[in-house]
Amino acid sequence: MLCIILSVLIGLFTLVLLFSTRVRRQNEPPLDQGLLPWLGHALTFGKDAAKFLARMKEKHGDIFTVRLAGRYMTVLLDPASYDAVLGDTASFTQNRSQLLKSIFSLVLPDMQPSAERTLMEQHFQGASLSKLNGAMGAHLQSLLLSEHQGCRSAEWSQDGLFSFCYSLLFRAGYLTLFEGRDNDAAVYKEFRKFDGLLTKLAYRSLKGEERQTADSSRERLWRLLTPVRTSGGSESGSWQQNYCRFLRGEGVDEETQTRALLLQLWTTQCNAGPAAFWLLGFLLAHPAAMEAVKAEVGTLHHLTNGPVAALQAHRTPVLDSALAETLRLTAAVMINREVARARTLATAGGREYHLRRGDRVCLFPFLSPQMDPEIHQDPQLFKYDRFLNEDMTVKDAFYRNEKRLKYYTMPWGAGRNVCVGKDFAVASIKQFVFLVLTSLDVELCDPEAKLPPVNPSRYGFGMLQPKGDLQIRYRLKRTQHRM
Ligand code: HEM
């Protein structure tokens, strides 16, 4: 009996080995399958994708194929060649269905991606944008001033900078886009629990208790978002109202619409808060940068009334460069596409590589261009004026192999799926920083404190998050103008 069981197990193991192992063909990228059958490099990748891919880049160069949990992914790390993937939307398609299922328990029908994109553009760009910016500014202002009334007495309050930034930007963003619900604090609290388990959901590596927490948190968020969907929004023609109408038009049932709202909550709210944290954190840890930004913001504050008007009427080159530098260091999206039909990829270096149908292609701009020492000198350092010319214009001339680059930093992605909320996100972060610096005195509790390290499991999921927090104290400025 034992012999039979053993033979079956050996047979199964051999089958797994046979079917999950591939042989590199001529003109294919270097292949690195890892030692573990089927899993390949999945565990190392999930722990710290940036470290793993940097090691692979050193071993194989700018293009290579790795095996991750039975699938093959070709990683391209030469920004001069990115357009070969981003520009060919027929061969390289976006397939998010697996991630939507594992993270959001969401299965959407085959929808027209261009119709959804157009809907998003109508609401986050052009004429709608200034209305959104106005609403966001008002919510930020009222949350910041009402919640921190305690510091009116000129006493210092203490908080972790990450919680402070994420809470304010998330809740103001939720109130702006999901319309005037007064459950913003409850949604934020539940969302943070869910967001904390997001990468484990994506990698399907939750342990028993964590799975229960993730499931119940997701269900609570669906319940919290249900009134948003059923009320249809207070304002006609609002984003969330039109989004639900679009889904109905695509034949999506009510329960799936609510699930899709959670996906949208994540897409629209999970990046700006962490970005504001890193920006304020870098400024607090770099006094010269803080002084330069404060000088610029202070001038505008005296010229105009309120952050929206000030930021609309005046350029802020120093703040813009500090934000671009922050995003270079902490925006770490992976741009994943599926190879819809076998094809040859021509790189900028003149090589041609054959890619197999069904494989994935991944661009990881965080490693290159953003942290590439050939493009940015001392890439690990925060230099607030890295993207600023002496005449205060934007510095956009960066080179690799002596060739000027189109993509020298890519926090917003690129091509057809470039972040549709970019302008809204930039305006929100700038308004937030403007408000904090003009209405509060903020300082590090420990003047010698360093920024916390990055949580390495977040590489690939948009803005990085810290492991731990940075304690700050703050109080309302005595010279606070009525805004
Ligand atoms: C610092 C803040 C943000 C960063 C760094 C960021 C980054 C990105 C990136 C890199 C992508 C492309 C992903 C890909 O190609 O696979 C993306 C897509 C998207 N972003 Fe953002 N984002 C931010 C904030 C926002 C905000 C505030 C909104 C909306 C209000 C938003 C809405 C979207 C949407 C709808 C897409 C999908 C676009 C499409 O697939 O066509 N983002 N974002």
Image (cartoon, rainbow, N blue to C red):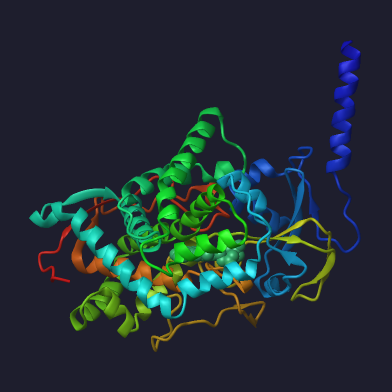
Q: Above or below — where is 350 with respect to 255?
A: below
Residue 46 x/y as whole percent: 61, 45
Residue at image position (56%, 41%) is 200
The quadrant where residue 276 appears: bottom left
Residue at image position (31%, 85%) is 313
The quadrant the N terminus occupies is top right
* Residue placed most toward the observer, 308 or 265: 265
Q: Above or below — where is 146 with respect to 313?
A: above
Q: Which residue ends up furthest to the bottom in the rendered image?
A: 391
155 relative position to 49: left or right: left
* Residue placed most toward the observer, 222 or 363: 222
The answer to whether one can see residue 371 in this image is no
Residue 20 x/y as whole percent: 83, 42
Residue at image position (86%, 48%) is 22
Residue 297 x/y as whole percent: 26, 76
The quadrant where residue 288 appears: bottom left
Residue at image position (74%, 76%) is 348
Numbered circles on residues, count: 0
The quadrant the C terminus occupies is bottom left
74 relative position to 105: left or right: right
The answer to whether one can see residue 126 in this image is yes
Residue 50 x/y as whole percent: 59, 54
Q: Above or below — where is 483 with respect to 206?
A: below
* Residue placed most toward the observer, 33 or 13: 13
Q: Which residue ends up furthest to the left in the rendered image?
A: 153
* Residue placed most toward the observer, 220 or 152: 220
